[in-house]
């Protein structure tokens, strides 16, 4: 028999490969078994953590933006943390409320230390929710101490709820007021040859004004002034009440700040102290010594006995069985189809509502809305699914967060009760469509477009050609119809007439209080109030379960969340790093312009043949 070296080499490699493959599978199976054992131990041993001792302080350090729902998923979080670039962190509002409410009842927790240096942003309604939770901790007899190296306007609103507020001696309290300047691009677009064709309904619908003008319309300026004045009044009233200051104290301090700063020799810490905005000036180590004196030393004897936000949250195991109020979070802009967590897809959010409706353990639904709107079609998909849920006999309660305007209001209409925070930005009942064209650009470049069509409607919207007035007429008629549909549905939901909705509509935004006065919402109340209302309507007994209805999480993500804890689920989008442009424009300004002009460019994509937009272009101040 002849020797065949190639055949022998193939057989030898085959044996080696099968052995390697078997080894790989064996290692993976052992690893999987180890993970399963770890999860079982975590579940049946209370997380495998050491019980807390008495006189433990809860250290509530909010790192990142306070959000209704994390964006992305655990896999994206880990990829972001592993890659280059700056990672934007987020903390869910519901987690903060859960931790504070449990701490208020926990006999092992003696106090709360609130650290806000790394809290990047939050809407006013969310801050008010956390403020109420802090008040509940104080009502249980437990002191809340707030400390910061400095406080911006949002951070200070939370700090003002604390029993005592301390700040680093070199810090400052920056309460500036509300208001905004927007960029307007009419001249810039004219220079590059872009024509913005706008069809809208709503005198106050100012979303598209930056693209068609060089400044706000009188109506937009009037509405903004009315809105910001109300929000500012609410903010200063709350701070003055929390700090036991006379009415008008904040406004007076701002007016006299230059003089008072001079008298304080430029010492911002001293200014905050004399202005009664803080109770004392302490460094971090001095706060640590104070917490030791008021509580107890830790096992090492170097600090006070404490438990962090993330660790404490992991100790709290949610109930998985029993009658529940189902919560669907609708946070972000509204699109037509499927959208990831942290944004709203008409199809994906409607599917979550249907899932809640078909779940026999869920007896009522709360829709938590934090959205400036978006697609009218996507909004209607969600509204219809809520309507079917009510028809199936399950109560639906809407809880408005910081913003629930335009499309965010549309999805709130099919409900038994609408709750809004005092500072919720809502309303903006209006519709528009934008069709940008660049015929002047192509002329400058010497590009020509021509062809043959069987009707004038074929290729009617071509961004390379001027907009056909007949096509513009068609779109305006459609926008008029959608606005009529919007106001008619709102009138039916609010048990009033379409003309009355039109009077308070026209694209105008309102605070929650102003919306209540105009019949657009039912109740000024918190998220907790909305949950209680839903439970009462469903006749649920005390101790009912709150179940968050969210997209299915893969087994891989579930394992990662358990292994890496809260921090792995906090992450979210990698922020693009923009340096200075050659012109010297700051990166923050470049990012804003890029976003707004990019949004305009996106409107030209996937035209069907156009998109009816219900968006207020408003954000919480």
Image: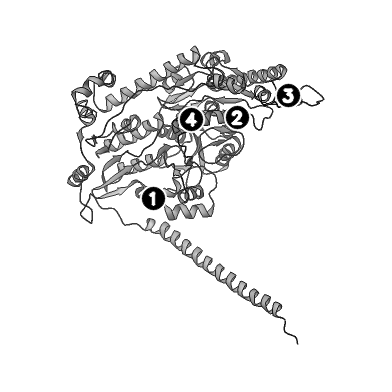
Label 2 sits on residue: 601
* Viewer-closest of 445 and 312: 445
Q: Nearer the viewer, mark 3 or mark 4?
A: 4
Instruction: Look at the numbered discs 2 and 1 and tell me whether their residues touch, using CB distance below 8 Å.
Output: no
Per the image, the residue denoted by label 1 is 314
Residue 460 disc label: 3
Residue 383 visible (yes or no): yes
Q: Nearer the viewer, residue 609 or 372?
A: 609
The first of marks 2 and 4 along the sequence is 4
The spot of residue 416 in percent (x, y) is: 51, 28
Q: Marks 3 and 1, Cα distance to the nearest angstrom?
A: 57 Å
Q: Position of residue 250 (x, y in %)?
A: 28, 22
Taking the view exactly as shown, the residue that stands out farthest to the left is: 293
Please indicate whether residue 414 sits to the left or right of residue 118 in the image: right
Position in image of residue 27 (x %, y %)? 52, 68
Depth-wise, is mark 3 or mark 2 nearer the camera? 2
Quadrant where the N terminus is found in the figure: bottom right
Mark 3 → mark 4, Cα distance in angstroms = 32 Å
Residue 15, above or below 503: below
Residue depicted at 70% across the width and 16% down the height: 469
- The residue at the point 67 percent across, 18 percent down is 477
Tell me the colour scheme of the image: one colour
């Amino acid at each position: 028999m002849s020797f065949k070296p190639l055949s022998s080499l193939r057989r030898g490699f085959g044996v080696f490969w099968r052995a390697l493959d078997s080894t790989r599978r064996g290692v993976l199976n052992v690893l999987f078994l180890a993970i399963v054992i770890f999860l079982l131990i975590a579940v049946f041993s209370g997380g495998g953590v050491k019980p807390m001792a008495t006189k433990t302080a809860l250290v509530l350090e909010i790192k990142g933006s306070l959000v209704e729902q994390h964006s992305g998923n655990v896999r994206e979080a880990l990829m972001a943390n592993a890659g280059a670039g700056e990672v934007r962190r987020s903390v869910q509002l519901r987690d903060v409320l859960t931790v504070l409410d449990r701490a208020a009842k926990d006999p092992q927790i003696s106090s709360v230390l609130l650290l806000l240096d790394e809290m990047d942003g939050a809407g006013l309604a969310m801050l008010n929710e956390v403020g109420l939770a802090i008040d509940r901790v104080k009502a249980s007899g437990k002191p809340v101490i707030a400390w910061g190296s400095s406080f911006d306007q949002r951070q200070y609103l939370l700090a003002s709820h604390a029993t005592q507020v301390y700040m680093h001696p070199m810090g400052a309290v920056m309460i500036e007021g509300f208001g905004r300047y927007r960029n307007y691009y009419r001249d810039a677009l004219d220079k590059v040859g872009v024509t913005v064709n706008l069809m809208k309904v709503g005198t106050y619908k100012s979303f598209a004004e930056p693209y068609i003008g060089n400044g706000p319309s009188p109506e937009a300026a009037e509405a903004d002034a009315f809105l910001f004045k109300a929000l500012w009044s609410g903010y200063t009233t709350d701070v003055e009440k929390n700090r036991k200051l006379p009415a008008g104290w904040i406004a007076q301090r701002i007016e006299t700040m230059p003089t008072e700063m001079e008298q304080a020799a430029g010492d911002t810490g001293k200014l905050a102290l004399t202005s009664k905005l803080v109770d004392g000036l302490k460094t971090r180590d001095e706060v640590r010594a104070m917490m030791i004196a008021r509580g107890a030393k830790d096992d090492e004897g170097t600090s006070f006995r404490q438990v962090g936000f993330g660790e404490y949250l992991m100790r709290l195991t949610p109930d998985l069985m029993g009658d529940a109020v189902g919560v669907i979070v609708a946070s972000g802009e509204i699109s037509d189809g499927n959208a990831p967590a942290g944004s709203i897809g008409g199809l994906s959010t409607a599917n979550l509502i249907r899932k809640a409706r078909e779940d026999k353990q869920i007896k009522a639904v709360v829709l938590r809305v934090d959205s400036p709107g978006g697609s009218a079609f996507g909004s209607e998909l969600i509204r219809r699914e809520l309507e079917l849920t009510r028809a199936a006999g399950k109560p639906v309660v809407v809880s408005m967060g910081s913003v629930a305007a335009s499309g965010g209001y549309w999805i709130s209409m099919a409900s038994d009760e609408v709750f809004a925070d005092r500072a919720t930005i809502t309303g903006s009942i209006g519709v528009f469509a934008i069709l940008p064209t660049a015929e002047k650009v192509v002329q400058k470049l010497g590009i020509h477009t021509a062809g043959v069509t069987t009707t004038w409607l074929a290729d009617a919207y071509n961004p390379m050609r001027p907009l056909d007035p007949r096509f513009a007429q068609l779109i305006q008629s459609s926008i008029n119809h959608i606005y009529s549909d919007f106001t008619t549905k709102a009138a039916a939901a609010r048990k009033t007439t379409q003309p009355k909705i039109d009077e308070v509509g026209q694209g105008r935004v309102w605070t929650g209080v102003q919306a209540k006065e105009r019949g657009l919402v039912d109740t000024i109340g918190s998220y907790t109030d909305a949950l209680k209302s839903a439970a009462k309507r469903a006749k649920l007994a005390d101790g009912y379960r709150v179940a968050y209805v969210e997209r299915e999480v893969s087994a891989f993500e579930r394992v990662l969340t358990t292994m890496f804890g809260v921090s792995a689920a906090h992450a979210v989008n990698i922020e693009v790093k923009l340096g200075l442009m050659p012109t010297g424009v700051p990166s923050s300004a470049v990012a804003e312009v890029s976003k707004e002009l990019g949004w305009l460019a996106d409107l030209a994509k996937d035209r069907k043949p156009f998109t009816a937009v219900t968006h207020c272009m408003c954000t919480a101040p």
